[in-house]
Image (spheres, rainbow, N blue to C red):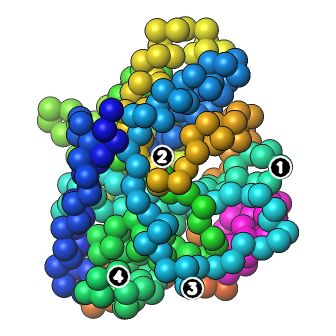
Amino acid sequence: MSVDAKFVDSAPEGGPGGTPPRHVAPRRRHPLRRVLLVTLAVLLVAAGGTAVAMTLYARDIDHDIARIPTFDQVPLRNRPAKEAAAGDAMNFLMLGSDTRDPGSTGGSRSDTIIVLHLPKDRSGAQMVSIPRDTWVHVPRSADGRHGGVTAKINAAFAWGGAPLMVQTVEDYTGVRIDHMVMVDFSGFKDIVDALGGVQIDVERAFTSTHSLNPDSIRHFRAGPQTMDGAAALDYARERYAFADGDFARIRHQQQVIKAILSKASSGGMLANPARLNSFLRASADSVAVDDTLNIIGTADDLRHLRSENLTFCTSPSAGTAMRGDQSVVLPDTAKAKKLFAAVRRDDVPQIIALGTDK
């Protein structure tokens, strides 16, 4: 099977640097409608069965996954070095877009940016969300036509695809990125439905006015509830109903990811062959990764991962502000420096302490 995928890149609203070029990578046989932050869930479930089943499945999906040339286009001289103390700890850059978001003007904007740290002892994973409007330095793109300016961090993908996004995140965090995974959050719908729904504890009642429902309205009551795919997607993408906007959306996306992991790793899922196959196929059809990622090795690395040893945090910010006509998130550079230094050292207790220190 061809593993090509098409990504058409577009600039974020109000982004500096002019209109970005349209980068067209090779096409896949069937269009890549969604890419996956839920890669962890796929690999987790694959690894949750027997070693033989894990290997056979990983080999199978390895032929179906879109591969994106990434690291050979990142200037080596500009990349941060890995610290000896980190050993074989790994860092993934996970990018997501929300093509159904009414605020999106293009289908390949990186609306969600997460640095996932897998410690050397493989005891769990730490996921650090970086708000998409974080005001950072974006290096010059490979063609020299864009970047070299301060902009919203998600401008990097629009101007230079995955390579410039990796370069920008490495420049901001000082963390060496080992692998890259992409996801379109609209893919949550099929994945959650394949799981038979997920349990979400809604922090407070709200109404989404950009829902998948025919009338675009969905009401969420407060408290624990089971959500199907459409409801989970509406929940994960809503930001207009909250005073803290994108920060609320980040929290909800983290909830949904954790709920998917919890359901995917349950004994009931592994004991239901039809549902397991449906989930794996829905997920595998969504994956796009860098061209150096070893699927089988990563599945083995993640075999012990469960929702209870997955920690979420958000890169520290100093509030919002206007830069020209753009509303941006100002990074708290002092706190962010400490947090990402802990990631570089593989200091898990410090990552958790600094990441949850509000």
Left/right placement of residue 279 relative to residue 304 reads left
Q: Is residue 172 magenta?
A: no
Q: Residues within 10 Å of mark 3 (few under 14, many from 20)?
A: few
Between marks 1 and 3 in the image, the one whose residue lies nearer the viewer = 3
What amino acid is found at the position of numbered circle 1 in the picture? Asp
Query: How far separated are the C-alphas under marks 2 and 4?
Result: 25 Å
Q: Indicate the position of residue 206 as horizontal and vertical percent values.
A: 37, 44
User: Which of the numbered marks, if any, corresponds to residue 121?
Assistant: 1
Q: Is residue 344 magenta?
A: yes
Of callouts 1 and 4, the N-terminal one = 1
User: Which of the numbered marks, if any, corresponds to residue 37?
Assistant: 2
What residue is shown at x 67% (from left), y 19% (from top)? 52
Of callouts 1 and 3, the N-terminal one = 3
Query: How far separated are the C-alphas under marks 1 and 3?
Result: 29 Å
User: Which of the numbered marks, if any, corresponds to residue 319?
Assistant: none
Q: Indicate the position of residue 169 as horizontal and vertical percent values.
A: 51, 73
Q: Which residue is mark 3?
A: 77
Q: Indicate the position of residue 147 as horizontal and vertical percent values.
A: 34, 86
Secondary structure under the numbered disc 3 in the rendered image: helix
**Is there a contact, CB below 8 Å, between mark 1 and mark 2?**
no
Q: Residues within 10 Å of mark 4 (few under 14, many from 20)?
A: many
Q: Residues within 10 Å of mark 2 (few under 14, many from 20)?
A: many
